[in-house]
Image (spheres, rainbow, N blue to C red):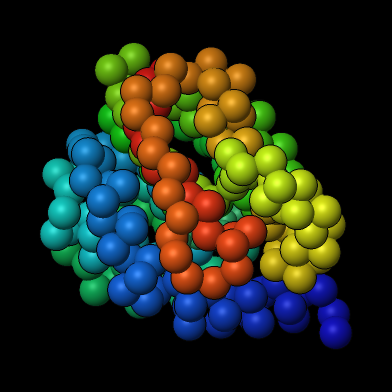
Amino acid sequence: MPLSFYAHRLLPLAMDFVLTRPYYNDQRRTSMRAAAGRALEIGFGVGASVEIYATDTTVRELWAVDPNPGMLRRALPRVRRSALRIHLLRGTAEALPFPDAAFDSVISNWTLCSLSDPGSALAEMRRVLRADGRFLFLEHGLAPNPRLARRQRWLTPLQRRLAGGCRLDLDIGAAIRAAGFRIETIEHYDAGRGPKTLRQMFRGVARP
Ligand SMILES: C[S@@+](CC[C@H](N)C(=O)[O-])C[C@H]1O[C@@H](n2cnc3c(N)ncnc32)[C@H](O)[C@@H]1O
């Protein structure tokens, strides 16, 4: 199967089917509550978070970035239905086309795992945040339990091939700190559904 058919058609279809379910939206709602003002979401996917901005946050303008045109195509009808001012942009978190300190909030939901270079992406997110801004993250990552962490490391090469580059073994707290953020809150929980290696969630707030 050609890579582009998988990446641009099948993957967005699967994301639209899976990531728009209440199980995921309930988790997003808790994590995104503090989003405010001018916001940037990286790895926007099919736009599953659009409704939440309108109902649960005080965001007044959203910039939404994703490199995959297949995702953006699926996000478009949700964006058009929303009353919020949303700018959809094809691009990567590693090279954000915004000046320094342009945003009050940066949001990442289940995206750090898919980045080939999470360090430079996090540095970019920090650069575009205002000094008093917030980075709101909701990510799956490396479990604190060493046995489970070993299994995640072992399975990551296979997972990356099957799920658009998604890795199971990213240490979320360490990656965010290494980019110069100060973590204000970080909560680890087992989301309770699906493989144990994939449901180790990290939700929190970091300051630039
Ligand atoms: C697992 S999906 C999550 C989508 C969305 N955040 C959600 O909650 O439904 C990961 C997303 O990250 C995007 N992505 C992959 N590489 C990226 C990059 N370098 N910069 C920004 N987004 C990227 C993918 O195209 C995909 O839409």
Q: Position of residue 66 (x, y in %)?
A: 54, 55
Taking the image as drawn, is residue 146 in sight?
yes
Q: Quadrant of residue 158?
A: bottom right
Q: Position of residue 167 (x, y in %)?
A: 70, 53
- Relative to 184, say whether 66 is above or below: below
Which residue shows up at 61% across the image and 43% down it? 145
Q: Quadrant of residue 112?
A: top right
Taking the image as drawn, is residue 61 in sight?
no
Task: Specify the quarter for ligand 1.
Answer: bottom right
* Image quadrant containing the N terminus: bottom right
Q: Position of residue 147 (x, y in %)?
A: 71, 47
Q: Left or right? Give the position of 4 relative to 20.
A: right
Q: Position of residue 193 (x, y in %)?
A: 47, 70
Total marks shown come to 0
* Image quadrant containing the C terminus: top left
Instruction: Report the front residue among 124 and 143.
Output: 143
Instruction: Report the front residue among 36 and 84.
Output: 36
Which residue shows up at 61% across the image and 20% down it? 178
- Relative to 111, say whether 146 is above or below: above
